[in-house]
């Protein structure tokens, strides 16, 4: 297997509908694993991702890159309504900061 399944982003949550813990993997949004304990749900989703990666390798398919090892530029574009853009520009000007700095601080 070319990718290490331990590098993927796993998350646990509770399903009230199923009354079980759910193991999820951000890079494989279509996969999930239900189990009685969080430990078993995590083990289950990790096993499922490993099996999926093994199958993908056998079929010469590209596996998703783990989020943890991706390089990010720190830049992304967000479209907002013109009135929101105007309001944010006014707030930035009144605060004496750039629009970029104002929006970045609101995201933190």
Image (cartoon, rainbow, N blue to C red):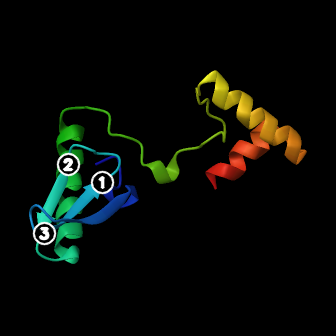
Mark 1 and 3 residues: CB-CB less than 8 Å, in contact? no
Residue pictured at 70% horizontal, 46% vertical? 104
SS label for mark 1: strand
Compare marks 2 and 3 and give the one earlier in the sequence: 3
Query: What whole-number distance in Å separates the C-alpha atoms at marks 1 and 3?
Result: 17 Å
Q: Is residue 65 shown above or below 14?
A: above
Residue 22 x, y percent position in the rendering? 20, 63
Label 3: few (<14), some or many (≥20) within 10 Å? some
User: Residue 73's spot in the image, x, y percent?
Assistant: 66, 39
Q: Which residue is mark 1?
A: 25
Mark 1 or mark 2, earlier in chain:
1
| Image spot of residue 83 (x, y percent) | 66, 26
The quadrant where residue 10 appears: bottom left
Residue ID at (37%, 55%): 8
Q: Is the residue marked by circle 2 packed among few (<14), some (14-19), or many (20+) residues within 10 Å?
A: some
Q: Mark 3 = which residue?
A: 20
Q: Nearer the viewer, mark 1 or mark 3?
A: 3
Q: Nearer the viewer, residue 54 or 64?
A: 64
Which of disc 3 and disc 1 is earlier in sequence?
Answer: 3
Q: How many marks?
A: 3
- The residue depicted at 78 percent of the width and 45 percent of the height is 101
Compute the Cα span from label 2 to label 3.
Answer: 16 Å
The residue that mark 2 highlights is: 31
Residue contact between numbered discs 1 and 2, judged by CB atoms under 8 Å: yes
Q: Which mark is residue 96?
A: none
Cα distance, mark 1 to mark 2? 7 Å
- Position of 64 relative to 37 (above/below): above
Looking at the rendered structure, the secondary structure element under dot 2 is loop
Crowding around mark 1 (Cα neighbors within 10 Å: few <14, some 14 to 19, many 20+) is: many
Position of residue 90 relative to residue 20, above or below, is: above
């Amino acid at each position: 297997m070319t990718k290490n399944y331990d590098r993927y982003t796993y998350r646990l949550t509770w399903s009230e509908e199923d009354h079980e813990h759910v193991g999820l993997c951000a890079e494989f949004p279509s996969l999930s694993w239900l189990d009685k304990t969080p430990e078993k749900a995590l083990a289950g989703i990790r096993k499922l991702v490993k099996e999926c990666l093994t199958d993908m390798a056998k079929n010469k398919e590209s596996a998703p890159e783990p989020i943890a090892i991706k390089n990010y530029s720190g830049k992304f574009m967000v479209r907002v309504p013109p009135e929101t853009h105007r309001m944010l520009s006014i707030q930035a000007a009144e605060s004496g900061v750039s629009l970029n700095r104002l929006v970045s601080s609101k995201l933190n």
